[in-house]
Structure formats: structure tokens, C-alpha cells
Image: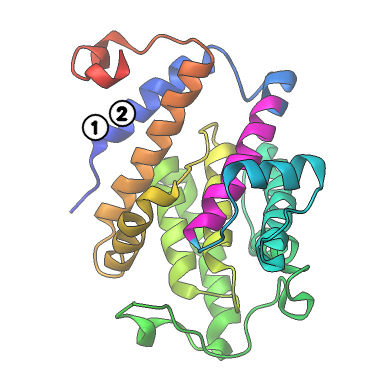
Amino acid sequence: MSPDTKMFDKIDLYKSELNKKRPFQDPVLLRELQVFYRIDSAFTSNALEGNSLTLSETKIILEEGITVGGKPLRDVLEAIGHGAAYDYMFSLIQNNSLSVNDICKMHRLFYEKIDAENAGVLRKREVFISGSEHNSDIPEYQDLPAEMRKLETWMQKTRKNTHPVLFAARLHKKLAQIHPFIDGNGRVCRLSMNAALIQNGYPPAIIPPILRREYIGALEKSWTNDQLFIELIAGRVLETERDLMRMLHIPFPDKYIKHNDNEK
């Protein structure tokens, strides 16, 4: 089954409204958005993986460099690492491509304070995804260099002819199924997905922890049918666009206001 093209049309309509404000070209506004999503992205992405930091605690760590008492050291290091990886991800905004080297660098920046030996390095042993029925489908570690080369070839061939949101969602899915690193794969999948989105002028897809069950369930189903996962990611891009339009005081297009009271 193909993804819902109406949702992509709606995303593109909202993007065209946002482009009138040119948020990704205005240096001041771009910097404000970068800072805003840096904290939100670190909090939500880490929380999806069980990190106990709150949004305000993540903000204190990233903006003031102050550790939070009573919290596990690893949770603090994950916030710091995600901030560094996010900064690199955002620096790729002017690029027209994403490479395996970029993906490995994001992992290294995220993971180097946690486990320097394995940061940015393809795993050297087998891994398992908790609760998944597809662990036998995860590539063996000996096959990872070839799998990552295949991923890069897929990115180069597919990106130009695929809707950017569809491409970003499938990049996340493919990277998650390869599971190239010993740990931190989920964080790197979401960073890579968002790198692809912002390079094409779309806002990042922020997945709040309240959607953890739906997100994990859709990702698990994507091994055989990725429609549900693509729709979930598209929905999150759309929600980020709505948030941006509210912050920038951009009216919602009449075409959709008439059919959705939540957007009034």
C-alpha cells in the first residue's frame, strides 16, 4: 500500500506558507529555531530510550552546563552528547546529501563521552532489539560495512525522486533495521532522519515520549509494511509545522481550517 499522498500535500502546503517567512534563510530566526529544537530534540529523543531527564533539566544541562543532582551520570552524558550531535546535524542544513560518514560522526559525537571505544564505530558483535520479532533479520556485524555502503547507494539513487518526508522516514527505517552501532541507534536514526528533512527545508520530526508505544509499534511493523511508520513520521512533521506557524503567527490555510477545528 502506498502512503497517504493527501498528508504530503498538506505538509507541502504548510511548508509553502512557512517559506513566505523564510525561516530557514533568515540567520537570526534560523539560530532561534536551532536553539529551540536542540533542547526539545534532546529531551524527546533521549526520553524515548528511557532517559529520566525532564525537559527543564535537559535545558539546564545544555544551556548552562550544570549537572542535575540525583540523576544518573549516563542520562546527563546522553543530553550533552545529543546536543553535540544535533549541532553537527544542523550544520548539514546547506548540504544536498547525507553520507555514512555523517551518520557515523553523529554517533561519535553522541556516544564518545559514554563509550569512546565504540563511538562512531560499526559494532563488532551481534545485537538484539528488545521486544522485536525480527532480530534474526538484523545484519550480522561482519556484513555491516557492505550494508552501510548499500544504504549510501540507496540514499544517492532514491533521494532525488522521492518526496523528502517519505525519504526521511524510510532512511530512519532502513538505518534502524541495519542497527549499525552497539548502542544509540535510535538517537542516530532520528538525527539522520531530521538531517534529511532540514536539508530540504522541512522542520524536524519531533516524537514526544507520549507516543513511544505507537512509534515503536509502527517501527516494528515497518519490517513488512512501512505505511503506518511513514504516516506517523509525516504526522510529526505536520505537527512541527503547525507549531512553527503558531510561533510565527502565520494563519493556517483556509482549505484546512474549514475541516479541522484544532487548527483554528
Q: Position of residue 93 (x, y in %)?
A: 66, 38
Residue 156 seen from this side:
no
The residue tagged with tag 1: helix, strand or loop? helix
Q: Residues within 10 Å of mark 2 (few under 14, many from 20)?
A: few
- In magenta, the rendered stretch is 32-48
Residue 213 seen from this side:
yes
The disc labelled 2 sits on which kind of residue?
Asp
**Residue at screen point 36% across, 87% down:** 136
Q: Main secondary structure of the magenta part?
A: helix
Residue 60 is labelled as none
Q: Alpha-carbon distance for marks 1 and 2?
A: 5 Å
Q: Position of residue 219 (x, y in %)?
A: 34, 62
Can you identify the residue that label 2 sits on? 9
Residue 33 is a magenta residue: yes
* Residue 189 vertical placement versus 8 (above, below): below
Can you identify the residue that label 1 sits on? 6
